Image (cartoon, rainbow, N blue to C red):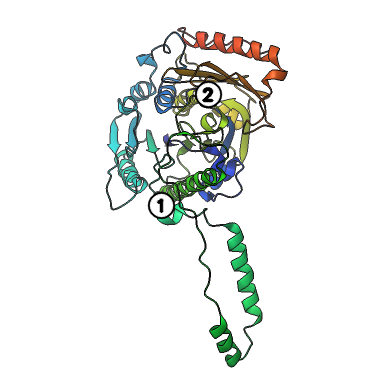
Amino acid sequence: MKVLVISARGLHLGHLGCYGNEWVETPAFDRLAAEGVVFDGHLADRPDADGAYASWRGGRYCLPAPDGDAAPPNPAADLLHLLRQQGVRTALVRDVSRPTAPAFAEGWDASLVSDTGDEGTPMEYALDAWQEALDGVADSENWLLWLELATPLPPWDVPEGYLVRYLLDRDDDEEEEEEEEDEEWVEDEGEDEEQDEDEDEEPEEEIDVPEPIVDPAIGPLDPDDDRTFLRLQRTCAGAVTYLDAGLGLMLEELQRRGLLDEVLLIVTGDHGFPLGEHGVVGPCRPWLHDELVHVPLLLRWPGRLPAGRRVAGLTQPVDLMPTLLDAFGVPPPVVHGHNLLPLARGEVDRVRDYACSGLRMGESLEWALRSPEWAYLLPLRGDPARAPRLYVKPDDRWEVNDVAQHHLELCERLAEVLRVFVEATRRPGPLRPPELA
């Protein structure tokens, strides 16, 4: 059994074609979606690096509480510990061009750190290290190789062509195409007329291409600053397309090695990255909107999982640990997560009724609950303070229209469910979540 996990840190799900985007080019992601299973409702339980890594390895929620932190992880229920007991070789490749969680690097049989330098981008170095790690596990029959990529996180260190790829004014592009079509109609004119036209021809106007914002300032963004918002979105889109190109190279390398149809390939992310959708850029507020908590999850396993299937059921990072254990035939311990393989095969239609998230930044704290019908955001502490928010799902995908004032009793019920749920995650043993009426 061979498993490759690719975690793209800070990957904005709204820039992927397989998740509905129509203007960003992501052919490798689209290929994985066509050949594998796409989870449409994968929501981070704690959308920061430390929280994601704890959920992936421990399979238990680590939601922050007002009166303390989450329950400590159980070392005996660690993913790597359980795999090692079954003789599975594990290897980790880290892209350290951005701050990372050092605890996640502990316990692997091999842990490689990609080099950094001026001769290439961080992703190029990470892919070199990934190939080295592939060589290291080649003689093992059972292995888990985990590749961490920080390409979607700013400052965006990608080739210039990708940075400006989506910053060109599309109206200018259309005008250039029309001019080219007009030129085709006059190709049969005489040489003299062409020379006269050349003499009278005015110099072309230079296209005003906005500068990409490579290293955006983390903090509030003026909601009326549409130009900066678009520059942010389009610069990030270039980084996502560059990430997609790297994913395409990995698929080609797996094909060359004869591994592409042997491995279980999992692509996901630890959290999204706000780009001004709700007036903030980056991790400056614990506001659990869709652009931060909604992350991709794609599984490709030829012959074991159906191709082209989309899963609507709600899933979370705590589900990855029992899923990986089941793939290796290892009985899972008592954890909060669920094995997603039956869901991916269509044997069940859901593994939970709702998904919960929590995040603390400084003294600010927020919880969120999402069901197929609602998204409820509950600030517990905050600066600036804000009221609870309620959004209709799936209609209000990007959570623009707050309807909390129209459903006060529902908000009270959801707030109580959140409090009981977080308390339940801090108890030992199996999770007993409260019912959602």
Q: Would residue 26 be seen by someone viewing this image from the given angle?
A: yes
**In this rendering, is residue 359 above or below 13?**
above
Say whether disc 2 or disc 1 marks the residue closer to the N-terminus.
1
Cα distance in 3D space between marks 2 and 1: 31 Å
Among the 4 quarters of the image, the one containing residue 74: top left
Residue located beneath label 1 in the image: 256
Q: Is residue 10 left or right of residue 139?
A: right
Q: Dot 1, how many residues are within 10 Å of its Cα: few (below 14), some (14-19), or many (20+)? A: few
Q: Which mark is residue 339?
A: 2
Judged left or right of residue 245, residue 170 is right
Q: Which type of secondary structure does the marked residue at label 2 adopt?
A: loop
Q: Is residue 371 visible?
A: no
Residue 308: numbered disc: none
Quarter of the rendering occupied by the C terminus:
top right
Q: Three-letter amino acid code at disc 2? A: Asn
- Which quadrant of the structure image shows residue 173? bottom right
Q: Nearer the viewer, residue 351 or 307?
A: 351
Residue 75 in the image: state x and y as whole percent: 35, 15
Residue at the (47%, 13%) spot, across then down:
334
